[in-house]
Image (cartoon, rainbow, N blue to C red):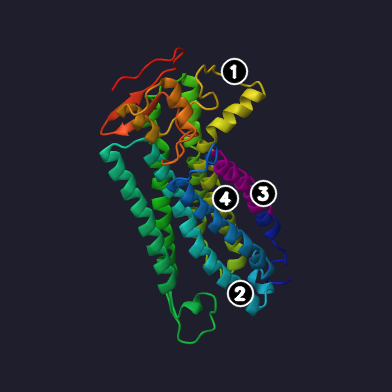
């Protein structure tokens, strides 16, 4: 009886899960950019950060095919040494990209919250969160490069005189990164409560908004599961086989994170689709701005300053605003924070009237 396990592969499961999700992620990301390009293309920093995350994910998906061809998903025993080295080298590159992709995903969410509220303490907290994500990504990349000297020893164990961290040090690095990701997800999922409760909308819509903005907790579950798998990685030496679980969960965590951060931006598209299917009733709007019931932070500042004289002009001009990021898919019209604890509440107007300074 052979002391080795049978020559089988788990790569098909990896490819099926990751590529199915990637197609869905691509659709959601594409709809996000489409929503932000209507009526004019005005992308915010949250969109730029999410674009970087999506591009990093796309590169990782491109590297996944050669990783599988070099033996990922098989038992190490059946893979030639040269193929094993190449598979581990591609893993090293993937890890460098993954940490920045997940960081940009969190940064995108932080910038999205910056669109909604401008209070000083809120700004400080969110900018510190962004700095934490950048610092974590940099520290993780540095740890990857210093884990072994020379660096190539991470994928080529035959290098003489190489010095590498022990298994405990490698696991500790992963645990710290995972802890930061999990805590950030939890905090960001709770932040919407601070402003959604102030919105003058039906409870049903408030619940939907909370659900949309708490989808990140689904990605958090993948992060927790991945952390549990790390404890077994590297103990048996069968890295290409054992690593398949970590690979699947890492991709799922990132892909669900991108979806969770993008879905709130599709609120108006989702509402129109549900209305078209007859699942929800439309809310009448008698203003000239009939296509959307959202306004940007910049537009409301103009309203507060009295620079627009007629209510009909306010709604019409909203479609031409080009000096601020698009907000139409995030926050309902009734309440948008202007900073320093102040807000403007607007209601539907049925009769054109004059605005006074």
Q: Of tags 4 and 1, which is closer to the observer?
A: 1
Alpha carbon of mark 4 to alpha carbon of mark 3: how far? 10 Å
Majority secondary structure in the magenta region: helix
* Labels in figure, total: 4
Q: Position of residue 252 (x, y in %)?
A: 57, 50
Alpha carbon of mark 2 to alpha carbon of mark 3: how far? 26 Å
Q: Which residue is mark 1?
A: 281
Q: Residue at x 52, y 69 (%)?
A: 92
Q: Of tags 4 and 3, which is closer to the observer?
A: 3
Q: Which residue is mark 2?
A: 86
Tell whether 61 sits left or right of 43: right
Residue 158 figure quarter:
bottom right
Upstream in sequence: badge 3 or badge 1 = 3
Upstream in sequence: badge 4 or badge 1 = 4
Upstream in sequence: badge 4 or badge 3 = 3
Q: Quadrant of the C terminus?
A: top left
35 and 97: which is toward the camera: 35
Alpha carbon of mark 3 to alpha carbon of mark 1: how far? 32 Å
Q: Position of residue 329 (x, y in %)?
A: 50, 34
Q: Circles 4 and 3: CB distance less than 8 Å?
A: no
> Measured along the vertical axis of the image, is residue 294 above or below residue 115?
above
Q: Which residue is mark 3?
A: 20
> Measured along the vertical axis of the image, is residue 286 above or below residue 75?
above
> Measured along the vertical axis of the image, is residue 85 above or below residue 349?
below
Is 230 in the magenta?
A: no
Range shown magenta: 16-35
- Tell me if mark 4 has few (under 14), some (14-19) or many (20+) residues whose alpha carbon lies within 10 angstroms of its own: many
195 and 142: which is toward the camera: 195
Q: Is residue 294 visible?
A: no
């Amino acid at each position: 009886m052979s002391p080795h396990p049978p020559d089988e592969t788990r790569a098909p499961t990896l490819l099926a899960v990751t590529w199915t999700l990637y197609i869905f992620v691509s659709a959601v990301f594409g709809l996000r950019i489409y929503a932000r390009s209507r009526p004019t293309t005005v992308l915010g920093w949250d969109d730029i950060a999410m674009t970087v995350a999506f591009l990093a994910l796309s590169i990782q998906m491109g590297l996944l095919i050669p990783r599988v061809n070099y033996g990922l998903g098989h038992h190490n025993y059946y893979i030639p040494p040269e193929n094993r080295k190449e598979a581990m080298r591609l893993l090293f590159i993937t890890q460098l990209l993954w940490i920045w992709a997940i960081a940009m995903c969190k940064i995108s969410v932080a910038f999205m919250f910056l669109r909604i509220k401008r209070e000083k303490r809120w700004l400080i907290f969110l900018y510190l969160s962004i700095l934490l994500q950048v610092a974590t990504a940099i520290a993780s990349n540095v740890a990857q490069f210093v884990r072994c000297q020379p660096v190539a020893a991470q994928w080529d164990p035959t290098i003489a005189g190489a010095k590498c961290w022990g298994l405990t040090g490698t696991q500790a690095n992963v645990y710290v990164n995972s802890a930061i990701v999990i805590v950030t997800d939890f905090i960001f999922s709770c932040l919407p409560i601070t402003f959604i409760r102030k919105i003058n909308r039906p409870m049903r819509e408030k619940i939907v908004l909370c659900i949309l903005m708490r989808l990140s907790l689904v990605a958090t579950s993948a992060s927790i599961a991945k952390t549990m798998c790390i404890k077994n990685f590297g103990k048996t030496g069968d890295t290409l086989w054992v690593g398949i679980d970590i690979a699947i969960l890492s991709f799922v965590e990132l892909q669900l994170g991108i979806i969770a951060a993008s879905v709130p931006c599709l609120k108006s598209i989702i509402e129109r689709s549900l209305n078209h299917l007859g699942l929800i009733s439309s809310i009448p709007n008698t203003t000239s701005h009939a296509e959307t019931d959202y306004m940007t932070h910049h537009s409301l500042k103009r309203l507060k300053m009295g620079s627009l004289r007629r209510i009909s002009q306010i709604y019409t001009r909203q479609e031409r605003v080009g000096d601020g990021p698009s907000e139409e898919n995030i926050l309902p019209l009734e309440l948008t924070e202007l900073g320093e604890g102040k807000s403007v509440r607007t209601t539907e107007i049925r009769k054109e009237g004059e605005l006074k300074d």
